[in-house]
Image (spheres, rainbow, N blue to C red):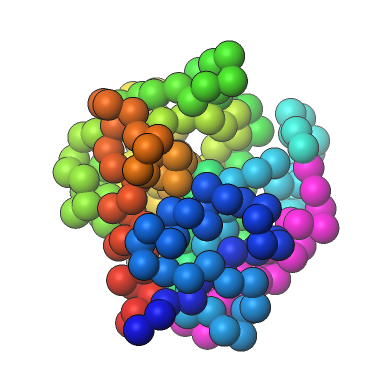
Amino acid sequence: MAVYILLPGIPGQFPNYENALLRAGAVPCWQPEAAEGLLLPGGGDVHPRFYGGAWEDCRNVDEVRDRMELELLARFLAAGKPVLGICRGLQVLNVALGGDLRQHVEGHGQVCGADGLHATRAAGFLQALYGSRFTVNTAHHQAVGRLGRGLRAVQWTADGVVEAAEHRVLPLWGVQWHPERLTEGGRYRDTVDGGRLFNWFTDQCLG
C-alpha cells in the first residue's frame, strides 16, 4: 500500500528529501488531504516573533513559510497524524508547542560548505534505531532552547545542544541533523544510515 507523506513547498524544491522518502517506500505529495504523514524539511531560521523572542542572530527568514508550516503542523496534530521535523523542522515543532530557540550556537555549522560531524548520545526512538552513542552530520547555527509542551529531548552533543526530541504522547519527532544527506550515495563512513530513520517514519505513517 502506498504511503503518502506531505512535503511542504512545491515538487522539486527539496530533492534530497523526496529521494529519501522514495527510497523508504513512501510517496512524496503536496496535498495535505491526501497525506498520512508530514515531513518538515530544513531551511532558514524561524522568525523570533513566533516564539516571543528579540531578533539577535537570524538568517534567511521567510515568515510566509513559517506561517504555512505552523498551520500545516497544527492541522496534522489535530488529526493525530505522524510528523517528522528535520533541522529547521525540529525548530518549527518546538516553536509550535510553545518552546523557543537558541539563535546561535558555535561549532555546529558547515565548514567550507560541507557538513561537519559530531558524536552524540541518545535515548528514546533514536536509541532504539541506532543505539545510545553514534555520529551524525551537522549544518545548523540555531538550536532548540526551552522545550515545547509535551516534548522531551532524546539526543545531545557533548556540549549539551539538543539534537533530537520526541513528544511524550503525540506521534511527533524531530532531529536537528540531516538524515536525507546520510542515505544511499551520501553517507559518511563514520555516521549512521539516515535511510533507517526514513524507513521508520514511513512505518509510523502506515498506522
Question: For the point 50% across and 18% down, which residue is it?
Answer: 107
Residue occupying the point 43% across, 54% down: 20
Image position of 141 with respect to 10: above or below? above
Residue 69 in sight from this viewpoint: yes
Residue 64 percent location from the top left of the image: 82, 58
Q: Which residues are magenta?
A: 61-80
Q: Is residue 56 above or below residue 75?
A: above
Inspect this view and state whether residue 169 appears. Answer: no
Between residues 105 and 133, which one lies in front from this camera angle? 133
Q: Relative to 12, is 158 on the left or the right?
A: left
Q: Percent position (x, y) of residue 41?
A: 57, 52
Asked if residue 70 is among those painted magenta in the image, a careful observer would answer yes
Which residue is drawn at the image coordinates 52% and 62% (left, top)?
A: 39
The N terminus, quarter of image: bottom left
For this orientation, the residue located farthest to the front is 185
Q: Position of residue 118 (x, y in %)?
A: 36, 24
Q: Quick one: which residue is furthest to the top in this view?
A: 112
Q: Is residue 202 magenta?
A: no
Quadrant the C terminus occupies = bottom left
Q: x%, y% of residue 181?
A: 45, 39
The image quadrant of residue 145 is top right
Q: What residue is at 48 percent from the left and 70 percent from the top?
A: 27
Task: Left or right? Give the position of 49 relative to 10.
Answer: right
Left or right placement of residue 61 versus residue 18 in this view: right
In this view, 21 is above or below 180: below
Main secondary structure found in the magenta portion: helix
In depth, the one of 18 and 169 nearer the eye is: 18
User: In the rendered picture of this protein, how many numbered marks are placed on residues?
Assistant: 0
